[in-house]
Structure formats: C-alpha cells, structure tokens
Amino acid sequence: MSETRSTPSAWPVAVSAGLHNALCRRMPPALPAAELEPLTLELVAALEQGELTLPLTAERRHLAEASGWLVGDASPLLIQGDRIGWRRWLQAMEEVVEALVTRRSLPPPTPDPLPAPALPETLNAEQRAAVCALDQASVVLLSGGPGTGKTSTVVELLRRAEALHPDLRIGLAAPTGKAARRLGDAVLASRAPLPCSTLHRWLESGARGFGRGADRPLDLDLLVIDEMSMLDLALTQALIAALPTGCRLVLVGDPAQLPPVGSGAVWHRLQQDDVRPRFGDGAVHLVQTYRNRGALATLAAALRDGGMTAFCGAIDTLPIDGNVQLHRGSPWRLPSLVRQRWRERLERLSALAEGLDRCEAVHLATEAQPLLEAVEADLVLCPRRRGPWGLEDLNRSLLGEANAADPARWPVGLPVICGGNQPELGLANGDLGVVVGRGETRRLLFRSVDGEGLVQVQRLHPARLRRLEPALALTIHRAQGSEADRVMVLWPQALDPMSSSDHDRRLLYTAITRTRASLDLVTVP
C-alpha cells in the first residue's frame, strides 16, 4: 500500500471504480450509479489513509439514503453518529472493541503471597496508576505524547508484575522491527532481556496467513505492545485470535500520531470518548513531560491541541537560538541545506565505517557501535516518496541518477533500509543498516533484536536482502517508531493556518515528534 497520503494516489480511483461497479451489480442503487460514484471514491480513499469513516455532510447523507445502501444488515454503508463508512469494516472494528473490553474484565491471576515492590518516588500519580492498573485490569491502555515517560512506566509495570507473579511469561512487541528494537533496548537498559519482536513475528506471519491463532495461541501470560497507533484492524484481529484466555495486554501509544497504513485505526478508536471509559482504571493518559524539549514541546502541543492555526502561531514566535529552526526554499530545487548536511553526514559515517568489513566477528558489536549510533542520530523525513522533495527525488539528487538504483555504486557509510521482513536473517521491514567495505568485501552492517530480546550485529552480503534501498531520508510513515537526536523535516507545501486536514496535522505531528533534541523544518514560502 502506498505511503503517500497527503494527496490521493492512483489506486483508490481504480479500486473504487471496480468496487462501485461491483456493488451496483450486486445491489442496484435507487438512483443513477454515476451520482453515487463520488461517495464511493471518497470512502475508498479514506480507507487508504487508515480511516474507516468520513464526516457525514448533508450531501453524503442524501446520496447514502437515496441509494438504498443503508437499508438492511447486508447493506454496504453504515451511519454512526456524524460519520459514514463501510458497514463491513465498522462492524469488525466494534467486534475488536468488544473483545478487548471483555478481556479487560477478566479476573487477573491471583498473585503469589509476596509483597508488592515499592513504587519509585520518581513516578508521578498517573504513572503510578498505570503501574498498578494491571493488578485489577487485564487490559491496560497507556497513552501519552513524546517525553511523558511511557517507556519508564512500562519498565516499572513489568517489574511489579514479575514480583507478584515470578513465573510470568512476558513478551514485548511492536508493529515494526525498528519500534520493537527501540522497546527492547529501553527495557534491556533497566533489566534482563525479554523476548521482543515484531507482532508479525510473534504471530508467525507467512504467505498463507498467521501460524498463531485460536487453535495455536501464543505461549504468553502478558504481552506489551508499543506504538499502538500503527496497528490496523486486520493485524489486531489476528492478535486477538491468538491470545490465550488468561493473557493480559498492555497497549502503549500516542493517540495524536498518524493512523496505520492499513485500514482501521484501532488505537484511535480505543481513545474515543464512547470507548475509553469502558476500560475504567485500565485507561491511563500521561500528561507530564519529563524531557526538556524547549520549542519542540511548544510546537507539538500547539499542533496536537490547536491544529495548524495554533502551530503557525507558535512558529512565528520561535526563539532564534531555540532547538527548532525554520527554513524556506523553492519546492522545485533541493534546498542547499539538505545537500550540505548530507555531505557532512556521509563524511562522518564513512570515517566510522572504515575497516568494519575486516573486523573480527567477536569484536564486531563493540567496534561497530559508534557507527550504528551515528546512523540513528539523524533523520531526514519527507511526506511522500514521489514529487518535489520526495524520497526518490532526494536519492537521485544526492546520489546521482545511476548510483541511486545500483547498490554496487553506493558509497561506504550510506545508510540503507530493509524493505521487507526476513526472519531468517533476523531482519524486519524498516530495519536500518549501513554500507561497509568496497568491492569483494562490501557488506551491509545491521543491528537487530533476536527473538529473545538480545541485540545482534551482523554483516550481510547485499544479494541476501530481497528488498533494499538507500535511507538518506525516510517517509514520515516509515519513521513511525523511530527517534533521533536531530531531525530534518521536508514539508514541500505552505504552512497554512487555515488547513482543515486532520491527516496533514497528524502527519506533521508525527514528523516533528521523532526528534529528541533538535528539529530543522524546511518548507516553502
């Protein structure tokens, strides 16, 4: 599925036309089919953006009611409050909600007769509530923005759960390999490693579906899932089917981030006012920010709470020497700042990569650490793959037309990204690596987390990777679950205070919250 969402891609038009014609044949509408087609196109385009519904305007209501496609349990459309969408997906979403609410009410296991560990004084009231929520609820929803201490809360929650249930089988998961490794690293910094992997790997995803399900459930008593905003409806359905009856869930995420690439924003639905209260004390939202993020925090809060109008107002008051810098340039020419930063970064990475193709395997993890940290210290993000300042434009401009498509010509130190899951290599879609060596010794250096939560560093021949591309920049969607000290966001459209697009707001919010320290926002006049 396309990662481009700021403008419709080509496929919704073709798909919606076919779907529209099929529906008209199966259920002839009570008005001319051509009049109904625009609504079909809009609904399919919404699915591409992870949304199951559209706002119920007067025109959409008229078309839906006049079509007859709202009548009967087998009808294709459904109105929910002030929204309209496809009945099939909306009903499936509500089934997921009901399944999680039901699981939330399951009695937690009786703890061993051991004293509960004291809670650190560093935890605030909300964090304490989240840590203790698992004592009473079998499903915990832990939400919060960047820097609010979600990960440290999870670490304490795990510590308490293990103290009360010493034989607890715990698993850590995330939708992408990058997010899973970040979660595993964070937990490993405070305790012994735990099995940590992508949710697809936990569910044993393959060409024929998932190996785990109701007939072969997961061997777990507690599963923690990070970056919940990235989970779509289909993956959540597979997860629920594979959970044993007694397995408890801790779901963690930021509700202000982008919906998933696939259809059905489960995390966003769980945070809505008609659902969230049903989880009682198991739903905890963290507000207090612990990281000193300066202007970054101001911008993120303005965008999250006040939309583009508030964001543009905050941009106008940025301090000159703050940790957010605004740059403007022509959308038809790659900004010189991008070229300069890339030259400086490649020079630094090339120096750190020198000799790692010949390093003894026993010393590789230690010797490669500075390079791998440098690769992940910087991120360049853009909203789309194609078009001005798009991913493909950057690759051609910075590497050259011929070099961008030929791995044999990629320079030493070039960051690369794995484009698909390859469990046989311990790699997942989105894992970052770097080119080391030249000629016959050319290899790709990757760091990954194995199934037991342990970090491993390996050198792989480029031919072993089925899908591989340069990672000079990432699309914003691809960067979900990632963080970096320094982030540059290329936004090739004017920052319009009157913009009403919720998708653009979430896209920009996700981009700027990938940074831990400093942000360069590059846009057009």
Image (cartoon, rainbow, N blue to C red):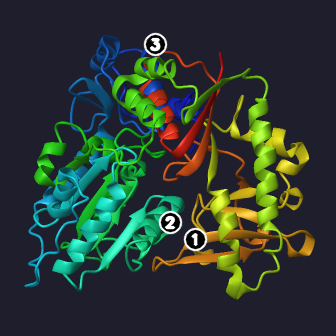
Q: Residues within 10 Å of mark 2 (few under 14, many from 20)?
A: many
> Given the image, on which type of amino acid does mark 2 rest?
Arg
Mark 2 or mark 3, which is nearer the start of the sequence? 2
Whether 83 is drawn above or below 248: the answer is above
Looking at the figure, which quarter contains the N terminus?
top right
- Residue at (52, 16) in percent of width and height: 496
Mark 3 sits on what residue? 498
Q: Are marks 2 and 1 in contact (CB under 8 Å)?
A: yes
Query: Can the viewer see residue 483 in this picture?
Result: yes
Mark 1 or mark 2, which is nearer the start of the sequence? 2
- Provide the secondary structure element on which disc 1 rests: strand
Q: CA distance from mark 3 to mark 1?
A: 43 Å
Q: Is residue 225 left or right of residue 124?
A: right
Q: Residues within 10 Å of mark 1 (few under 14, many from 20)?
A: many
Q: Is residue 173 left or right of residue 117?
A: right
Q: Residues within 10 Å of mark 3 (few under 14, many from 20)?
A: few
Looking at the figure, which quarter contains the C terminus?
top right
Q: 304 or 319: nearer the eye?
A: 319
**In the picture, residue 69 is in which quadrant?**
top left
> Given the image, on which type of amino acid does mark 3 rest?
Met
Query: Can the viewer see residue 210 in this picture?
Result: no
Mark 2 sits on what residue? 181
Q: CA distance from mark 3 to mark 2?
A: 39 Å
- Provide the secondary structure element on which disc 3 rests: loop
Mark 1 sits on what residue? 448
> Given the image, on which type of amino acid does mark 1 rest?
Ser
Q: 366 or 513: nearer the eye?
A: 366
